[in-house]
């Protein structure tokens, strides 16, 4: 018997909630959802990849969707005056006529829809159902009052409904956490059951005070856990690097004179960097192979490495973050070791650059809302950006203001991103915000600095604000900047040839 993967009501709920969920996989399967109300595992139109995505993600999407809706404050519910079913409006999800109409709104777009009580219970969050009960039974203005309370105390919904909040709190403090939740819920429920204007500040204060204390303890515990994870990741990375180094050493020991000459040649190194850059970019395999045709391959490698083998290695790197090519026994092991080393280095640099750019777009640069949104949208399109939930980019729009108000980084962020931002925040000055400094610079970036600076002091100040290179590289870079600016000034003044002649005379004299 065929199993239903997605019912019509679930399908419509996901389509309506999609603007708030915004994950690439849901966007990918959305055309199928629009064309087919009911989706079964035996449906002929269902591709294998779409079927797997729905099986893997359906529950997560429904949970995310349930949190995206709230009751409409000005008209949370209505009762149809007619006793005739044909006069009733239909539920937006199950399409059945309903007499008791609940009006819900999608938070991110303010889209309003009418939903029946059964679908509210089935699809909506505990918070919405809680407000539905109080609004229906006690106080029609409960949603308006709740909105006023949560605007003043945004931690209240977290206390009441977020089961993942304080997830790292020590076991001995769990009873206190339970008491805080019970006390908060009793206070909020008492406040909502009667129509009133003033907030229950005095009654709520002790619970909020205790909760903030628990948040501080949880934050320290979370930081300790993240440090443990970081150390474990570092140990794992060190192990991988030692294995890679062992492979590198083994390749070096086994290589012949011809291999040594090949590996030391400029053509081989250029080819290695070009292929590694394509792999680190993690493009679709078809695009990767198209771009690969533009890379000049050394003659000595043409009989040893082909596009199929490189495609296998690119796929392996996308999935695991390293290249071993264990299945490709005929590929030279020195080439695999070289490509793995260069690709990992480029990918690590790309990730650091992306994290720097993301931090600067959200915190480091003084940007207006439109500029910040545009910068974040651009970063979201990269491979690194696509691995981050869409909700993170919503947080980043207001992160600078939140940090200025002494708020912590959102605990829902991926651990690696939280760690990256934590490291960059640790070096911020006591007042003001400065950009995260990049650890490398391109000639094009240096050219932009020279073009936008009027004197060398201003040029070096702009350079030090954006970049922090190793000492030797920095000395060379600053020397090059000084010479480039002097040459530019000579060109603008029409004295380039005279300057060169005099320099030649100075350097040629004993």
Image (tube, rainbow, N blue to C red):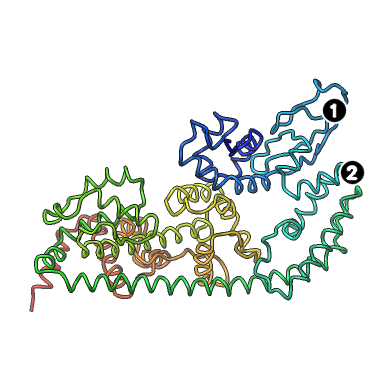
| Quarter of the image with the C terminus in it | bottom left
Give percent across and percent down for residue 11. 61, 36
The residue indicated by pointer 1 is 80
Residue at screen point 28% across, 63% down: 342
Q: Nearer the viewer, residue 475 or 56?
A: 56
> In the figure, residue 73 lies in which quadrant?
top right
- Relative vertical location of residue 154 with respect to residue 131 in this rendering, above or below: below
Report the residue at 80% width, 39% height from top: 76
| First along the sequence among labels 2 and 1 | 1
The crowding category of the residue bearing disc 1, from other C-alpha atoms within 10 Å (few below 14, some 14 to 19, many at least 20), is: some
Q: Nearer the viewer, residue 317 or 131?
A: 317
User: Quarter of the image holding residue 350?
Assistant: bottom left
Q: Which residue is mark 2?
A: 137
Q: What is the number of callouts on the image?
A: 2
Residue 228 percent location from the top left of the image: 53, 74
Quarter that holds the N terminus = top right
Q: In the visual, does 29 lie left or right of 333?
A: right
| Circle 2 crowding by C-alpha within 10 Å: few under 14, some 14–19, many from 20 | few
Give x and y (percent) for residue 272. 23, 58
Question: Could you tell me how far apart the alpha carbons at marks 2 and 1 are, in whole angstroms?
Answer: 17 Å
Query: Whole-percent x and y of residue 490?
Result: 23, 59
Q: Secondary structure at mark 2?
A: helix
* Residue in the picture at 59% in, 38% down: 3
**Callouts 2 and 1 close, C-beta under 8 Å:** no
Name the side, left or right, on which 73 lies relative to 332. right
Q: Residue furthest front?
A: 1
Q: Is residue 455 above or below residue 196?
A: below
Left or right of 244: which side holds 59? right
Residue 175's disc is: none
Residue nearest the viewer, comparing 150 with 31: 31
Q: Secondary structure at mark 1?
A: loop
């Amino acid at each position: 018997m065929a199993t239903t993967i997605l019912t019509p009501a679930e399908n419509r709920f996901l389509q309506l909630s999609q603007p708030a969920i915004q994950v690439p996989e849901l966007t990918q399967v959305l055309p199928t959802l629009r064309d087919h109300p009911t989706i079964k595992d035996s449906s002929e139109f269902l591709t294998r990849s779409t079927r797997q995505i729905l099986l893997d993600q359906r529950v997560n999407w429904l949970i995310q969707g349930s949190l995206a809706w709230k009751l409409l404050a000005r008209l949370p519910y209505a009762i149809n005056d007619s006793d005739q079913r044909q006069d009733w409006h239909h539920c937006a999800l199950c399409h059945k006529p309903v007499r008791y109409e609940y009006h819900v709104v999608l938070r991110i777009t303010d889209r309003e829809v009418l939903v029946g009580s059964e679908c509210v219970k089935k699809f909506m969050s505990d918070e919405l159902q809680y407000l539905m009960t109080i609004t229906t039974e006690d106080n029609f203005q409960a949603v308006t009052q709740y909105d006023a309370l949560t605007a003043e105390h945004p931690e209240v919904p977290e206390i009441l409904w977020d089961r993942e909040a304080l997830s790292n709190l020590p076991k001995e403090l769990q009873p206190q956490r339970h008491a805080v939740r019970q006390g908060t819920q009793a206070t909020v429920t008492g406040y909502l059951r009667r129509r009133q204007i003033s907030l229950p500040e005095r009654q709520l204060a002790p619970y909020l005070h205790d909760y903030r204390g628990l948040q501080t303890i949880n934050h320290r515990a979370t930081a300790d856990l993240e440090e443990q994870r970081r150390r474990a990741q570092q140990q794992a990375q060190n192990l991988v690097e030692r294995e890679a180094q062992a492979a590198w050493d083994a390749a070096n020991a086994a290589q012949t004179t011809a291999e040594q000459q090949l590996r030391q040649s400029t053509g081989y190194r250029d080819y290695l960097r070009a292929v590694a850059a394509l792999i680190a970019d993690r493009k679709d395999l078809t695009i990767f192979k198209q771009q690969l045709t533009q890379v000049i391959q050394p003659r000595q490698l043409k009989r040893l490495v082909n596009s199929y083998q490189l495609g296998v290695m690119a796929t392996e790197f996308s999935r695991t973050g390293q290249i071993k090519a264990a299945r490709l026994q005929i590929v030279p092991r020195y080439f695999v070791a070289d490509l793995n080393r260069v690709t990992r280095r480029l990918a690590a640099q790309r990730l650091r650059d992306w994290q720097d750019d993301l931090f600067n777009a959200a915190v480091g640069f003084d940007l207006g809302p439109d500029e910040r949104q545009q910068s974040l949208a651009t970063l979201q399109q990269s491979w690194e950006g696509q691995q981050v939930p869409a909700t993170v980019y919503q947080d980043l729009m207001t992160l600078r203001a939140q940090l200025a108000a002494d708020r912590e980084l959102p605990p829902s962020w991926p651990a690696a991103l939280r760690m990256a931002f934590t490291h960059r925040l640790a070096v911020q000055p006591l007042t003001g915000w400065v950009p995260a400094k990049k650890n490398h610079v391109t000639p094009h970036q240096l050219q932009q600095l020279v073009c936008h600076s009027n004197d060398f002091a201003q040029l070096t100040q702009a350079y030090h604000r954006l970049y922090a290179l190793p000492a030797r590289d920095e000395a060379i870079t600053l020397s090059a900047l000084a010479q480039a600016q002097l040459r530019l000034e000579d060109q603008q003044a029409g004295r380039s040839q005279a300057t060169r002649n005099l320099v030649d005379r100075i350097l040629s004299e004993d």
